[in-house]
Image (tube, rainbow, N blue to C red):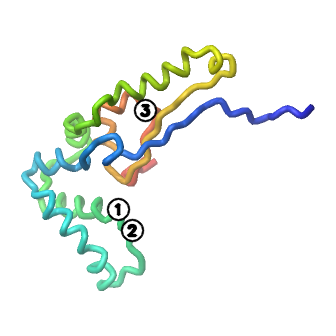
Amino acid sequence: MSQNLFVQNTIAIIWDFDKTISPKYMQEPLFRRYGIDGAGFWAEVDGLEDLYLRHGAKRVSKDTLYLNHILTYVRAGVFKGLNNNVLRELGSEIELYEGLPTFFDQVKQSVASDGSFVKHGLQVEHYIVSTGLREMIMGSKIAPFVEDVWDASSSR
C-alpha cells in the first residue's frame, strides 16, 4: 500500500475583506478623517483608466487604481500625515459584519475540540486576500483572528 507523503491537515479559509468581512469599504474611515467625499473620490478613480490609457499606458490594473489615487492625494497634501500608524488607527474604526470576529475563533475551536478532527491533526487557519490597505486590516478587530493578510499595498 502506498503512503501519501504530503498529508494536508490544514484547512485554510481565504477571505476577501470589503463587503465580505465588512459591510462597507475599508476606506470610509480614511475619507471621514480627512473630510473627503467618498463618492467623489470613487468617481475620480473610475475615470483614471481612460486617462492613463490616453497618456500612454499600455495596461491598467482597475483593482489597484485607487491606491495610486490615494498616493496622489498624499502628494497633493490632502491626506497630510498619512502613514502606516494612521492607517492602523483608522483600521480600528472599520465596521465588521455581526458575529465577527468571534465567528473566526468559533470555527477554529470547533475543529480543535472535535476528536475526529484532532486525531488527524486537522486545524483551521484564516487568511485575508484583498486589494485593500493591509495596515488598515491589521488595525481592525479581525486582525488577531487571522494568520496573515495579503493585499495590493503589501511589499511582501
Q: Which amino acid, by three-letter code, is at mark 3?
A: Val
Residue identified by numbered label 2: 61
Looking at the rendered structure, which numbered label has been put on residue 64?
1
Are circles 2 and 1 on residues that touch, CB within 8 Å?
Answer: yes
Q: Give the secondary structure at mark 2.
A: loop
| Position of 86 relative to 103 (above/below) | below
Residue occupying the point 19% across, 69% down:
44
Mark 2 residue crowding within 10 angstroms, few (<14) / some (14–19) / many (20+): few
Q: In the picture provided, is 4 more to the left or to the right than 119?
A: right
Looking at the rendered structure, which numbered label has been put on residue 146?
3
Q: Give the secondary structure at mark 3.
A: loop
| Position of 117 relative to 36 (above/below) | above
Q: CA distance from mark 2 to mark 1?
A: 6 Å
Q: Give the secondary structure at mark 1.
A: helix
Q: Quadrant of residue 68?
A: bottom left
* Residue at the limit of the structure toward the right, as seen here: 1
Q: Quadrant of residue 39?
A: bottom left
* Residue at the limit of the structure toward the left, as seen here: 35
